Image (tube, rainbow, N blue to C red):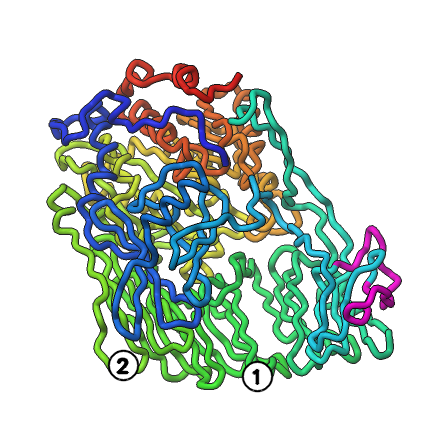
C-alpha cells in the first residue's frame, strides 16, 4: 500500500503544545491539554520500560532462539544459544538499517527497524523480513539485504488463488516426468520431449491441473485432481490519488463471496504400468468447500486428502486405495453447528481447532475435536476409523499442538482454562502420553505463557507475563537436569514512576447467569473517582479467536483514548473462541449477536460496582469484523450504545470473503444473513455514527461500507463518512500511514458525542496537505 497524502503530525504538535507533561486539573475532560498528554503517552511509557522481551522462536533444528526486546524506547533482535546460555545481537542492526534504507529509499534507524518479526534460514545464516509489503533477505554475517524475487504490489484477496507453476513433476525415482498436455495428464521419460497421455477426459472447463499432481513414493502411480472451475468473481478498485501519476488507476482481484459456485475437484488415480486410471467415487465428498492436496502413504498403498463440506458441518479425512480407487472415511467429524477448520498455514504451532497427525504411516491418527463440548485430542485407529481413546479431557481446552513424538508416544501442547478460578485465556504448556496418562505441566505460573521448543525437545524457552506483570523469559531443559536460567526480566519501576498503571481485569456473569465473561478496564491517568466518566468499548467479536489482551504491554492505544476523559474497555463475549464449544456456538448463523447480551451485562456489573462508570453514555468502535460489531451495537442495541465508529466493516456477510463468512454464517445463504446485516438493518440507526473505509481495501470489499451509506441516505439518517484515498484494510488505524489522522478523528468523535465538548480547531494549527504538496520538490504536474 502506498503512503498516505494526509499530514502526519502528532496530536500535540497539531495543537502547538510542548511535549513536556502539562498541568491539567483532574476535572478536565477533552481539553487541549488532555489531547497533548494522550499523544505523549506512547513515547513516554515505552521510554520508561526496560528489558521487555517478546516470545522466543527457535531457529531451524539448532539450539538457538531469536526474540525481540524493547528497552527505553529502543528495539533489538537477540539470539540466545541454549547450549551456552549466551545472548548476542541477532545481526548488525546498523548495517541492516543502512541496507534497507538504501533499498527502499526510506530512512530507518538501527533502534527502530521497519519490521517486528523475521524468518531465519534453517542454519541461521540469513533471515527474511517484510517491509511495506515487500520481502527482503538479509545476511547475518555481512548485514546486507537483497530484494527477494517475486515481490509484488497490492495482493489479491479472496479464496482459491492458484500457484502459477507449470513445471513438470518429477517422479521420486527420477525416471519420469508428469505434465499437462491439452488439459490432460501425460508422462514422459525424464529429459525426453515426447509424452504419452494417461487421460483424455480433461477439457477447458474440466481440466487436470499440474499443481494437483502427486506421485506415489514407488513412482508407479499418480494421483491428481480434475478441476471443474467455479465462478471467478472479481472485485474492482479505483485508486483515486496515486503517488506516481495525476490520473487515477484501476485494478481487480479475484475474491470469492458466500454463495458463489466453487471449484469441483475430482480425484483420479493413474497407473503407469497399465496406463489405466480410476475416478474416485465422490459419495464421501459430494459438496466440497475445499479439498486438501493429495498425499500418499509412504508404502504407496493409498493416498489421503481432507474434505471440508460446504457449510462446514462435515469434515472428513479420506483415504483412497491406490489399486481399486475405493475411498473410505478414516475420520468423519460431523458437528451440529460448525467445524472450526484450520485457516492458518497449517503448522503444528498454529493449527486452530483442526489438527491431524498420522502415526506409523496412518495406522493411528492423533485428531483434535470438540465432540465432548471442549477442544481435545483423540487417538484413532487408522484401519478401522474408530476412536481408541480420548487423550486429553476435562472442562478446559487444547489451544494448539506443538510437537508429537510417535516413538515416545507423547504430545506437547498448549491449553487454556486448566486452573479453576484463574483466567481461562492464559496459555499453559503440557506433555501427555498417547493413552491419556502422564499429563505433565511444563508451565504453572499464573500468567500467559508462550513457549518455544528446540526440534529435538531438549530445550525450551518460556516467556510469560500478565497485563500487570512485566515479562520473564526462562531457558529450561526438558529433562529438568538443570535449574531454569532467567534470560530476561522486565523492569517497570521507571514506568510506574511515570504514572503507568495496568488496566483492571474485570469478570462478570454472562447471559446464562453462570459463565464468566472476562474484560479489561482502562482509566485515564488522572482518574478522579468522584467524577462520572463516559464509557467506550473497543470491540472485535470475530469467532476465530479471543481478543482481550492477556500479556504485558507498556502502552496500548486504548490508554490514549481514555486519557481524554473516558473509561475504555475490551471484552470477550460469547461467540468468540478459546472457551467451550457452547460458548463458541453462540456465533453460529448469528454474527449479529456479537456477544452483546454478555457485554451489556458486563458493563452493568462494572457500573454496579463503580459509581464513576456512566452507562448512560456508552460508545463503541472497531475495525473489520469489529466494524460490523460496532455498527451492530448501534443498530441492534440503541438503548445502550449511543455513538460508534466502524472501520472497514464487513457490514453484510454476503459481501465479504467466503472463507470467513460461510464458516460462521453457514451455507446455503439464508435469512440469517439478512438478520445480521448492517445494510438491511441500517434503518434502525438512532445514535451517532462515523463510518471509515479505505478505497483500496482488498480484505473487505469497500462496497460493504458504501451499501450501508446508501441505506442510511435512503432512510434520511445523519452520519459521518471518511473515505481514505489509497488506504487498504487498516484505513486510519493500526500501522496504516493515516493512523494519526484516524486517531484524531476517533478522539474528536467521542469527545463531541459522549463528552459534549467541542474538539480542538485542527485546521488552525496544522499545515494543510495542499500547502505541503506545493512545497514538495516532487510535486506532480
Which residue is rendered at x = 80% and y = 60% of the image?
180
Q: Residue 342: give its label.
A: none
Q: Position of residue 715 (x, y in %)?
A: 54, 21
Residue on which disc 1 sits: 360
Helix, strand or loop under label 2? loop
Which residue is rendered at x = 13% and y = 34% of the image?
530
Q: CA distance from mark 2 to mark 1?
A: 29 Å
Q: Position of residue 524 (x, y in %)?
A: 20, 37
Residue at the outermost front position: 142
Q: Residues within 10 Å of mark 1 (few under 14, many from 20)?
A: few
**Range of residues picked out in magenta:** 185-209
Q: Main secondary structure of the magenta part?
A: loop
Q: Earlier in the sequence, mark 2 or mark 1?
A: 1
- Left or right placement of residue 703 versus residue 275 in this view: left
Q: Is residue 328 at least partly visible in the picture?
A: no
Q: Is residue 1 at least partly visible in the picture?
A: yes
Amino acid at each position: 500500500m502506498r503512503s498516505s497524502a494526509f499530514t502526519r503530525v502528532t496530536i500535540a504538535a497539531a495543537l502547538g503544545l510542548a511535549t513536556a507533561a502539562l498541568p491539567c486539573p483532574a476535572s478536565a475532560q477533552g481539553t487541549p491539554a488532555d489531547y497533548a498528554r494522550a499523544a505523549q503517552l506512547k513515547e513516554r511509557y515505552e521510554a520508561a520500560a526496560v528489558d521487555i522481551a517478546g516470545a522466543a522462536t527457535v531457529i531451524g533444528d539448532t539450539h538457538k532462539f531469536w526474540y525481540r526486546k524493547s528497552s527505553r524506547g529502543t528495539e533489538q533482535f537477540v539470539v540466545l544459544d541454549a547450549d551456552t546460555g549466551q545472548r548476542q545481537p541477532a545481526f548488525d542492526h546498523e548495517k541492516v538499517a543502512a541496507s534497507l534504507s538504501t533499498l527502499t529509499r526510506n530512512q530507518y534507524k538501527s533502534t527502530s527497524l521497519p519490521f517486528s518479526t523475521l524468518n531465519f534460514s534453517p542454519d541461521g545464516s540469513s533471515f527474511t523480513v517484510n517491509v511495506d509489503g515487500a520481502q527482503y533477505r538479509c545476511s547475518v554475517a555481512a548485514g546486507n539485504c537483497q530484494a527477494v524475487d517475486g515481490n509484488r504490489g497490492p495482493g489479491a484477496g479472496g479464496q482459491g488463488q492458484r500457484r502459477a507453476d507449470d513445471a513438470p513433476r518429477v517422479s521420486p525415482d527420477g525416471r519420469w516426468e508428469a505434465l499437462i498436455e491439452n488439459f490432460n495428464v501425460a508422462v514422459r521419460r525424464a529429459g525426453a520431449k515426447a509424452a504419452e497421455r494417461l487421460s483424455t477426459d480433461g477439457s477447458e472447463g474440466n481440466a487436470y491441473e499440474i499443481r494437483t499432481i502427486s506421485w506415489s513414493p514407488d513412482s508407479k502411480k499418480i494421483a491428481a485432481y480434475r478441476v471443474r472451475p467455479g465462478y471467478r468473481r472479481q472485485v474492482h478498485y479505483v485508486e483515486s490519488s496515486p503517488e506516481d501519476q495525476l490520473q487515477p488507476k484501476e485494478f481487480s482481484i479475484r475474491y470469492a463471496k458466500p454463495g458463489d459456485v466453487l471449484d469441483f475437484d475430482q480425484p483420479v488415480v493413474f497407473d503407469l504400468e497399465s496406463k489405466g486410471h480410476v475416478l474416485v467415487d465422490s459419495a464421501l465428498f459430494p459438496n466440497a468447500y475445499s479439498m486438501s492436496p493429495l498425499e500418499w502413504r509412504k508404502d504407496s498403498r493409498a493416498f489421503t486428502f481432507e474434505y471440508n463440506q460446504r457449510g462446514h458441518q462435515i469434515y472428513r479425512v479420506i483415504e483412497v486405495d491406490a489399486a481399486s480407487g475405493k475411498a473410505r472415511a478414516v475420520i468423519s467429524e460431523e458437528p451440529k453447528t460448525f467445524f472450526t477448520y484450520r485457516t492458518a498455514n497449517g503448522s503444528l504451532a498454529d493449527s486452530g481447532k483442526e489438527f491431524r497427525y498420522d502415526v506409523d504411516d496412518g495406522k493411528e491418527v492423533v485428531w483434535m475435536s470438540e465432540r465432548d463440548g471442549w477442544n481435545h485430542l483423540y487417538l484413532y485407529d487408522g484401519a478401522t476409523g474408530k476412536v481408541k481413546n480420548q487423550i486429553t479431557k476435562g472442562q478446559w481446552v487444547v489451544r494448539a499442538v506443538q510437537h508429537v513424538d510417535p516413538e515416545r508416544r507423547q504430545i506437547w501442547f498448549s491449553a487454556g482454562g486448566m486452573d479453576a478460578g484463574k483466567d481461562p485465556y492464559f496459555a499453559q504448556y503440557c506433555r501427555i502420553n498417547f493413552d491419556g496418562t502422564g499429563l505433565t505441566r511444563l508451565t504453572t505460573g499464573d500468567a500467559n505463557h508462550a513457549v518455544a521448543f528446540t526440534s529435538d525437545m531438549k530445550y525450551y524457552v518460556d516467556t510469560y507475563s500478565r497485563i500487570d506483570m512485566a515479562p520473564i523469559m526462562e531457558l529450561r531443559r526438558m529433562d529438568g537436569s538443570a535449574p531454569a536460567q532467567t534470560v530476561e526480566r522486565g523492569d517497570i519501576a521507571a514506568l510506574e514512576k511515570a504514572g503507568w498503571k495496568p488496566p483492571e481485569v474485570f469478570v462478570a456473569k454472562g447471559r446464562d447467569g453462570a459463565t464468566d465473561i472476562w474484560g479489561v478496564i482502562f482509566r485515564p491517568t488522572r482518574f478522579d473517582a468522584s467524577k462520572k466518566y463516559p464509557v467506550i468499548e473497543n470491540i472485535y467479536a470475530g469467532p476465530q479467536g479471543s481478543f482481550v489482551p492477556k500479556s504485558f504491554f507498556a502502552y496500548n492505544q486504548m490508554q490514549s483514548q481514555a486519557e481524554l476523559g473516558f473509561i475504555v474497555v475490551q471484552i470477550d463475549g460469547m461467540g468468540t473462541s478459546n472457551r467451550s464449544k457452547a460458548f463458541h456456538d453462540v456465533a453460529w448463523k448469528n454474527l449479529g449477536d456479537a456477544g452483546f447480551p454478555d457485554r451489556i451485562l458486563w458493563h452493568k456489573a462494572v457500573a454496579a460496582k463503580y459509581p464513576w462508570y456512566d452507562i448512560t453514555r456508552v460508545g463503541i468502535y472497531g475495525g473489520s469484523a469489529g466494524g460490523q460489531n460496532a455498527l451492530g451495537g448501534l443498530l441492534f442495541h440503541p438503548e445502550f450504545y449511543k455513538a460508534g465508529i466502524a472501520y472497514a466493516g464487513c457490514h453484510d456477510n454476503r459481501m465479504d470473503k467466503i472463507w470467513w463468512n460461510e464458516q460462521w454464517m453457514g451455507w446455503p445463504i439464508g435469512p440469517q444473513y439478512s438478520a445480521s446485516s448492517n445494510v438491511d438493518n441500517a434503518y434502525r440507526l438512532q445514535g451517532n455514527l462515523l463510518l471509515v473505509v479505505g478505497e483500496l481495501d482488498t480484505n473487505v470489499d469497500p462496497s460493504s461500507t458504501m451499501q450501508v451509506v446508501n441505506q442510511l441516505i435512503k432512510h434520511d439518517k445523519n452520519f459521518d463518512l471518511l473515505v481514505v484515498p489509497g488506504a487498504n484494510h487498516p484505513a486510519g488505524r493500526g500501522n496504516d500511514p493515516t493512523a494519526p489522522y484516524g486517531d484524531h478523528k476517533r478522539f474528536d468523535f467521542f469527545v463531541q458525542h459522549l463528552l459534549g465538548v467541542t474538539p480542538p480547531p485542527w485546521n488552525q494549527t496544522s499545515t494543510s496537505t495542499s500547502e505541503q504538496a506545493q512545497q514538495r520538490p516532487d510535486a506532480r504536474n
